[in-house]
Amino acid sequence: MALLTILKFPDPRLRKKATEIKKVTDDIRKLADDMLETMYDAPGVGLAATQINVQKRLVVIDISEDKSEPLVFINPEIIKEQGQREHEEGCLSVPEAYELVTRADTVRVKALDRNGETFELDTEELLATCIQHEIDHLDGKLFVDYISNLKRQRIKKRLEKQQKEN
Ligand code: GNR
Ligand code: NI
């Protein structure tokens, strides 16, 4: 197991589009485990491979209280969505920024699991928000793209300053 470095906004590598995983190999399973470890350590409830500078369509999520329900989504796709809901979002790649984002209320996701088997999952609440947020990462999109330019510029300036100091 290994902890991976999480890219921070406005790193241009967060804008790359991830490519489909053709075969679920031991390397992919190892990457998923390292991503889960990195997510739990952060701590966060989700992590997309894009955030650790790997351009593959792989997402991990665990919204449980006690880190007991790790979910792995390979090539995740939203196949149905209903309604709209506003939810406060944060992102491990955009530290200490929390803003309201409107997304679909409930979504049905189709993906491959760690054994390469297709599964479908109906999601709502935090899980629905999270899977949409993570699929956005795979497409080079961040939650700050949904807020005002002024707010985004303020966040960008603050993070650039912080990153220079480090
Ligand atoms: O840890 C996270 N919390 C969160 C809260 C509300 C909406 C989305 C998220 S995802 C985030 C982890 C992260 O950055 N995943 O990409
Ligand atoms: Ni994020």
Image (spheres, grey):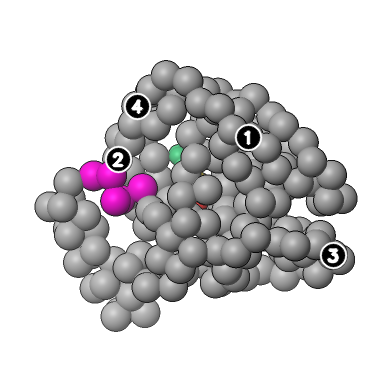
Disc assigned to residue 25:
3
Q: Nearer the viewer, mark 2 or mark 1?
A: 1
* Residue 67 at least partly seen: no
The CA span between labels 2 and 4 is: 10 Å
| Mark found first going from the N terminus, 4 or 1 | 4
Q: Is residue 2 left or right of residue 105?
A: right
Disc assigned to residue 86:
4
- The residue identified by callout 1 is 109
The answer to whether the residues at label 2 and label 1 have Cβ atoms under 8 Å apart is no
- The residue identified by callout 2 is 99
Q: Residues within 10 Å of mark 1 (few under 14, many from 20)?
A: many
Q: Under tag 1, what secondary structure?
A: strand
The answer to whether the residues at label 4 and label 1 have Cβ atoms under 8 Å apart is no
Q: Under tag 2, what secondary structure?
A: strand
The residue segment tinted magenta is 143-147
Which amino acid does the dot numbered 3 rest on?
Thr
